[in-house]
Amino acid sequence: MKTIYSLLCVLCATLFTNANAATLTVADLAGAVNRGDGVVELTSDVTVAAGDALDCGGVATLLLADNVTLTVHGTLLKEGSDALTIAGSGDAPAGIVLDGAQASARIAHVTMDGGGVRVTGGAVIDAVDCTFAAYNGNLSTAACLYFSGESDGNRVERCRFTGGVTAAIGNAANAPVGILIKDCDLTDNNTRNSNRPQINLTVAGDHDVVIEGCTVTGTGRTMVGGIGLSNLMALAYSGRATVSGCSVTDNRYGIACMGPMNVTITGCELLDNHHETNANNGGSGINLYDPTGKLSAVVAGNTIKGNLWGATIIGCHDVDMGHLNDDRSNTETTGGNTFADNGNGGVPYELYNNSTITVWAQNNTWGTGAQDAEHIEPLIFHKTDNAALGEVIYLPAGSTGLDTVDADSTLAYDAATATVSGRGSIIVLDSGGRVVASGERQVTASHLSPGAYLTTNGQRTIKFIITK
């Protein structure tokens, strides 16, 4: 009889249902034990039914016994600025599962210590100002915040992920998600050192993936990349993946994009991502790889420095790293990337075009003093080095002018093609001090009459001459 009673208790604790669509508190949950001082422990699995909402406010600490899972088919709430810690009463808590199209979570100021979160069946999560620390891998072997089903409208903002044994954020290869990851700090995740980056997302369908203003810092682990975006099953993709304003430092690689996708990478710092023991297997600041020839990328305004390879391109459909408007195209992108000190085996590799496509890479600054063909060409591997590969069109370079010319230098330009390039806002003045041209990064001066002019970006001023 004792055995039967124990079994019935477990079944009751496993499922908490409320047919009247109630708003529950933690204390209402079956199996919840009040430990005092704002501490409540769940001693066995608990399920919140679809239509019910669990409000975790008013509790300082929610403890989960070993391997205990809180499954939510309804709504999980923790709003307001008061802090909630969800941790284990032992060494092996599982965590929270959001399951089903009616399931969602809106959480703020929550610290997950040890456990993780799995989102499946169309559920959605909105997490702001949360911390996910020392994830133990019990709930998912792939990521601390793991999407095992397709969903859209997810947000993770101003959150911190640190010291997890797996990736921080990830999803299944057949379960694309729409998500905004903004202003988050990710440090030393995947401490198991498996072949997964700290952010590891599949992109497909019509979902947009936006990673903005995040810091992704490694500690020299040889298998752990920074940000990985992939479409390994070559699923149809009409959305866009965007990585902007991120700092990715000291990982195996910086940003890797694999498979068909539309991706934009702008304003990022990709520094010292060189912790790969074999340069043939990784170590790029940016890697664009798609043997199906469907990946399209725009790469602009990034600093790519100290990696084994600056940027590497394999396959792909179109890679635009700076395409200035000219006779051959009606498109225009800014370029503005800075490459420096990328290389391996004693050889500089700022850009490696290991594809057959032509790559436009104009208006970029390369890891050399003079920004001309003689000095830039040795830094780029492309058609010149292997006739089977595509060409990289890298002139005009972004630093021709203000960034590299001494203040007492004089430049001569043919009026038909005269341009002045540099960083930031540029103005051109005639001999009387009047502004005759201005613009961002690059100014066309071909409308000017022959004569002497000054150009400045507010920090450096140089003289140039229109010759004819």
Image (cartoon, rainbow, N blue to C red):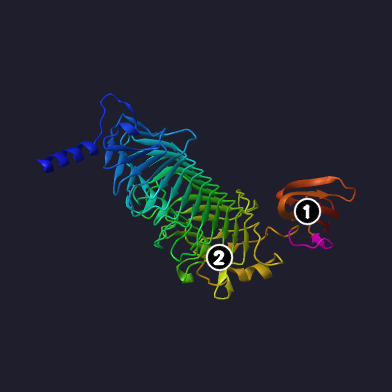
Q: Which residues are magenta?
A: 403-412
Taking the spot 40% from the left edge, 40% from the top edge, the residue there is 61
Q: Nearer the viewer, residue 176 or 102?
A: 102
Residue 357: x and y, percent? 51, 61
Q: Is residue 246 above or below residue 103?
A: below
Amino acid type shown at disc 2? Asn
Residue 454: x and y, percent? 83, 53
Q: Residue furthest bottom?
A: 346
Can residue 150 be spotted in the picture?
A: no
Q: Nearer the viewer, residue 441 or 164?
A: 164
Q: Is residue 283 left or right of residue 30?
A: right
Q: Is residue 273 above or below residue 138?
A: below
Q: Is residue 225 left or right of residue 50?
A: right
Taking the spot 31% from the left edge, 29% from the top edge, the residue there is 51
Q: Is residue 84 above or below residue 218?
A: above
Q: Main secondary structure of the magenta part?
A: loop
Per the rendering, the mark at residue 307 is 2
Q: Residues within 10 Å of mark 2 (few under 14, many from 20)?
A: many
Amino acid type shown at disc 1? Gln
Per the rendering, the mark at residue 459 is 1
Residue 413: x and y, percent? 79, 59
Per the rendering, the mark at residue 11 is none
Q: Residue furthest left?
A: 1
**Magenta stretch holds residue 408:** yes
Quarter of the image containing the C terminus?
A: bottom right
Q: Residues within 10 Å of mark 1 (few under 14, many from 20)?
A: few
